Amino acid sequence: MARVTLQTIADRVGVSRMTVSNAFSRPDQLSAELRGRILTAAEELGYAGPDPSARALARGTTGAVDVLLTDSLRNAFTDEVATTFLGAIAEELRPTGLALTLLSASERPEMIPARDVPMDGALVYSCNTQSTAVDWLRRRKLPLVFVDQSPWPGVPCINIDDRSGARLAAQHLVDLGHRRIDIVTTSILGPKGIVDDPLSAADGHVVRQRMLGWLDALHAAGIEPTVFQEWHSDEGSGKESANEVAGMLLDKPERPTAILCFSDVIAYGVVQAASARGLSVPDDLSVVGFDDNPLAQRMRPALTTVRQDVAAKGRAAAAALTEAIEQARSGRTARVRHVLLPTELVIRDSTAQPPPSG
C-alpha cells in the first residue's frame, strides 16, 4: 500500500497541500466544514497526522513544558499536595495547547538527564538550584520559573509565605501556654535524628523559611526547641520516617507537650507515634502540621495546620511560565516577577492547652 501523505489527502479532497497542513497545525485558518472534510478523508486513508518530531523541528517548538521535581516521580502521584499543584498547572496550560511532562532532578544513571528532554520551558519545583539538572536547563537558555525556591536574578519565582505561616503556627502553641515545644522537619540529604544547628541543616528554601518562622516565635518566648529531622527518601512516603523520629522525641525523659511539623504527612506520623505510646492528641500532646493537605481533615483528631493555596500556586506558576515562553519567542523583555502567596493558620482539633504537668 502506497504511503499516505498530505498531498494524497489534498488530491482526495480537492484542495492544496498547504490547506491540508493547516487542518492539522493551524485549524483556525479553515472553516469547520472544510477542516471536517479533510480530517474525515485523512481517517479514511489511514493517515494519523504529521510526525510530531518533524513538526516541532519546523516550528522551533516542542509544544511541551516540564516540571522538574526533586524527588522520585512516584511522589508526584502519591502526595496530595503535589497532585493538586500539578493538576492546577495542567488546567492553566490547557487553553495554550502546551503538554505537561514530569522530569526528576535525580542524577541516577537510569534517569533521562535534563539536557536530553525536548521542552519549551520548565518549572523548577523545590529543587536544589545547584543540581546538574537545573544547571543544564539554564545552559540551554530555556524559559524557567522557580517554585518553592530562593529567588534568582532574572528568573520568575512563585513562593508561599512559609516564614509567616510557620510563625503563626508556633505562636498559636505559645499562646495556648506550651513551653516544651519541639520540631520535626525534613531533609532530602539526611541524616535522620537530632539537629544541633537547625538553620545550617535546612537543605532547601522551604525548609529554611519554615524553620525561621518557628524560631521567630519560639525564641521570642524564650523557648529553645529540640529539632529532629526525618529523612525523606525517594522510596519513602515520609509517614514511616516521621513516625520513627517522633518516637525519639516522645521517648525523651522530658517529652514535649507540643510538636510543630514540616508537613501534614509528617504530622500524621507524629500522631501515630503518640498513639502507639498511649498518648492522646491533643490532651497529652498538641500537633501542628503545614500545607492543609486533604489528609489534615481526614485525620482524627482533625489537624491544626497552616494552609497554603496549592492550586493558586500551580496556576501562578503556569501563567508565569507561559508568559516567559511568549517573551522568549517574541524577543520581548519584561520585569521579572517574584510572587509571594499568603498562608493562613487553620485551627482544628489537634491542639489544646498543655496538660497540667506541662
Image (cartoon, rainbow, N blue to C red):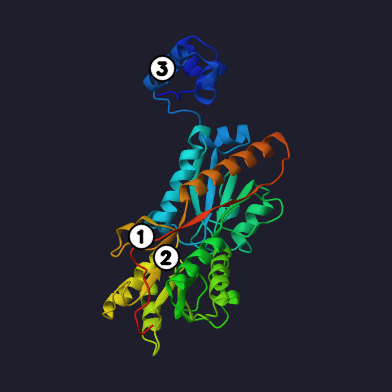
Say which of 179 and 268 sits in front.
179
Amino acid identity at mark 2: Gly
Please rate how many residues cluster around mark 1, counting C-alpha atoms within 10 Å: few if below 14, some from 14 to 19, many from 20.
Answer: many
Per the rendering, the mark at residue 41 is 3
Q: CA distance from mark 1 to mark 3?
A: 54 Å
Amino acid identity at mark 3: Ala
Q: Which residue is mark 1?
A: 296
Left-right relation of 200 to 280? right
Q: Name which residue lies at 57% across and 35% down.
A: 56
Q: CA distance from mark 3 to mark 2?
A: 58 Å
Say which of 256 and 19 sits in front.
256
Q: Name which residue lies at 48% across and 18% down.
A: 8
Say which of 106 and 122 sits in front.
122
Residue 149 can be seen, yes or no:
yes
Amino acid identity at mark 1: Ala
Q: Which residue is mark 2?
A: 289
Mark 1 and mark 2 residues within 8 Å of each other at the beta carbon:
yes
Location of the N terminus by quadrant is top left
Q: Mark 1 vs mark 3: give the one in front.
A: 1
Say which of 226 and 83 sits in front.
226
Q: Position of residue 119 (x, y in %)?
A: 57, 44
Label whose residue precedes the other's in the sequence (1 or 2): 2
Residue 283 placement: quadrant: bottom left
Please rate how many residues cluster around mark 2, counting C-alpha atoms within 10 Å: few if below 14, some from 14 to 19, many from 20.
Answer: many
Q: Position of residue 19 (x, y in %)?
A: 54, 16
Location of the C terminus by quadrant is bottom left
Q: Name which residue lies at 71% across and 54% down.
A: 153
